[in-house]
Every structure is written in structure tokens, then in C-alpha cells.
Image (cartoon, rainbow, N blue to C red):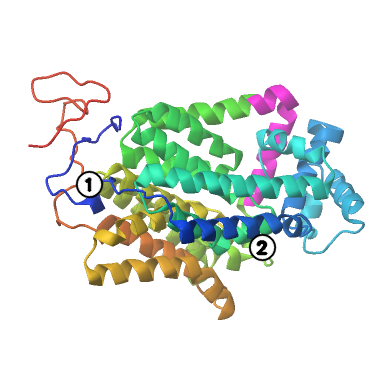
Amino acid sequence: MGMVPGYNDGPPLSASPALSDTHPTPMPGPAAFAALVALAVAHVFAVPIAAGRNGDFVHLWAGGRALQQGGGAALYDPRWHKALITEALGALPPDLWSSRNDALGAFFYPPATGLVYAPLGALPLPVAAGVHAVLVLVAGALAAVGLGRLLGGPSLLVRALLIFTFPSFFFGFALGQNGVFALLALVCGGLLWKGGRPFLAGLLLGLLALKPGWWLAVALVAPLATRSGRLMGGMVLGAFLLVVLGISALGPGSSLHYLDISRSLAGLHRLPDYPLHLQHDLLGLGRRLLGPDRGSILGWGAAGVLVLLTAWRARHLSPGRAWALVCLAVTLVNPHVHHYDLLPALVGAAALAAAWPDQPRGRRLLVLLAVLAHQGAFLVEIALDLDHRVSLPALAVLGLWALTGWGMEASPGRPAWRRSPPGRPPGAAAGGRARRGVHVRRK
């Protein structure tokens, strides 16, 4: 494994597999393989059902379709969106169009995102929805594979179960949402950072500017937690290139129009019909407690504390667990997380599952309960009709964050991966010269 900037890549003094990202990842046995196949087949057969659901994907398709037929001027035009949705569905379903859509339209993403969805917009809606559903499944499978490389475990079966049985994945799959692509980007970005390529990691994570809330959250958390200016530089460059792409392809008018829409969207939480019960982040928790204004102050204050604690604690963890802590913090800090956006928190759940076999019995039970609570929080919240008063999913993610950062140390106070001494480049031995990819063992 290559060097991680700011971390020493040698084994810890206490050779605990739970702390060193070196868990074996065994191939699934016959029963596990059969379960994986059954899970995959079930989702594949569900593709036509998801394609016919006519959920949130209709809005994304309408943006791509408007761009295909009307160019940049139509991308944010509510009249185009309304006409295209009515033509595709034969009517305008009330759950897909409200009074604010008359003013803002149906596509709330940057111009570059419209270019990404334009190829799907060229297809009839049912076909485009089916293709998108397949892409969601592929992204989920790739994320399951990448998690094994990032964390050194758990088994492929456990990783697949964590992703494909997570309610947020199911709802994103059924509604045509794109949260799984944020999960995949964070997993791949973590792999690049762990492999000693922070600038490339940042460049990849810069693509999250296609959905700006994720870019903002990662920019707030990851550079501080990794102490990597190159990662931040890559993120800024990646976002800048997307802006340049949007302007060069569609002209500056679309970008200016998107800025106007963004300002309107920033104040949506003050509207009486804002679906606050669907917001599952620290801002959502604060607004449920104190209302839109004072709750926003509380939420952003809590987010600031969380970012600082994550930055401090990540330096004492192995790279895999540090990145899992980052992903959990990113999920909580993102200012616009709905239930189908909670997927990046699965990195934390997988990290705990990877460490589970090496923990004492009592701690194993704690880990198991935390992961199960995370997997089922949204369903329990809906069943008990609690979503207007509290966000159980956000509290479950907060629990995973605390357990990942502070609840799994086999040797309290002893970091698993030592920080490089001040003034010495990462990987440099005393009196020597830093070499990329050279392991420095602790003595």
C-alpha cells in the first residue's frame, strides 16, 4: 500500500487487525455465493418495476430531455419541464409537480449535471428509467467491491448485504435517485487517498459538484481530516472544470440561471410545505428542535463541532477507519440529505463490520446493535410516525460516527497509525529522505 500523506504506513505497536486495515477478505462460500446471486437476481427483476415507478427520476429525465430538445435556454424553464412530463405520462401527477415547480421548474442541478443526464433525456422515459436503474445496481456492486479494498473487510457477502438491503438504497433505486453514485465516488476517492494520490482523490471528489451539497460537505470535512491541501486543490480544480464545461457547452446564461435557482432553493426550508420530515442531517435535527431559523444556527454549529472533532480524531486512526469517519461526518454535515442520500454512511457501517470479529463480546454486541439500528432506523421512524419530531437515521449515523471514532480502540490512547513527526515528510525515517510508497515500521 502506498503512503497516505500525514500518516505512517507501518503496523501499529499493538498488532490488532481491528486497527490496521489488514483484515482478510475471504471469498464467499457456496451458501454465501447463492445468497449473493439471489440478491442480484431479485434486484435485476425489480428493474422494470423501478422503471415504471415514475419517481424522482422523472425530474432528472425532464432536465436532460429539455436540454436535448431546447438547448441551454430550456434546461431550467418550468414550461419545458411541465410540457415534457405531461407528454411522457399523459398527465401531471401532483406528487411530481407543486406550486414551487411552477416557479423553479423540476431540475435543480448545475448545468454540467444536465449534460450528464442529456443522453438519458434522449431516450423515452421508461427506457431511460430502466437504464438508470441498471446503472444504480452496477454502482452499488462496484461500491461493495471497493469497500473491501478500502477497509480490508468485511466479506463480500456482508458488504453486499449492507448496501443492497439498506432502505436508502432501495428507495433510491425505486425512485431513480443518485445517492449511490456519491457513495461510489467517496469509496474510490478514499482508495486513491489511501494509496498516496490525494490530488487525484480530490479531482475525483470534485465531480461531486454535480450535486453541490455533497461537494460542500466533503470540502468541509475531508481536507482537514486528511491534512491534505492537495486533496482540496484537486476538489477545487474538479469543480472548476465542471463549471467551465457547463459554460462552454451551454453558454453563461444557464449558469447564471442556476445561481438564481440556488438562491431560491437555499430558502426552501422556510416554506410551510417544505418536507422537513425527509431531511436527515444535523441541519434537519436542529430545525426539528428549534424551527427553521434558530434550528439552522444550531445545526451549523453542531456541524462545525463535528468537523473539528473528525479532523482531530482521524489523525489517530488507520487510513481505512479515518476515511470511514470522514464519510459519516460528510453525511451529517451535508445540508440537504434525504433518506435516499444516506448511502455514504455505509462506509462507516462496513468499517465497524470489518472490525467486529476482533472485538470483545460486549463490544461485538454494541457494534451489531449500532449497525442494525443504522440499517433499520428509517423504517422504524416511518412505522412509528416519528419523522416530524426526530430523525432516527441521523441519530443512527451519529452513533456510527462516535463508535467508529472512539468506541473500537483495543489500546486506548495509542494511535493505530502514527502521525509523522513535525517537520518531517510522511514516510521519512530519522536522518533519511522521504520516499513515495516506502513503509516505515515503528520500533
N-terminal of the pair, mark 2 or mark 1, is: 2
Percent from the top left, x then y, of residue 127? Answer: 80, 46
Q: Where does the magenta region start and end?
A: 245-265
Which quadrant of the structure image shows residue 123? top right
Percent from the top left, x then y, of residue 418? Answer: 18, 40
Q: Does residue 185 show up magenta in the picture?
A: no
Determine the main secondary structure of the stretch shown in magenta.
Answer: helix
Looking at the rendered structure, the kind of residue marked 2 is Leu
Looking at the image, residue 170 lies above or below residue 63: below
Q: Residues within 10 Å of mark 1 (few under 14, many from 20)?
A: some
Question: Taking 261 as reference, is 218 left or right?
Answer: left
CA–CA distance between discs 2 and 1? 43 Å
Q: Which mark is residue 271?
A: 2
Q: Which mark is residue 316?
A: 1
Q: How many marks?
A: 2
Residue extending farthest to the front is 30
Percent from the top left, x then y, of residue 113? Answer: 67, 37
Question: Taking 5 as reference, is 442 left or right?
Answer: left
Image quarter of the C terminus: top left
Which residue is located at x 33 percent, y 29 percent?
196
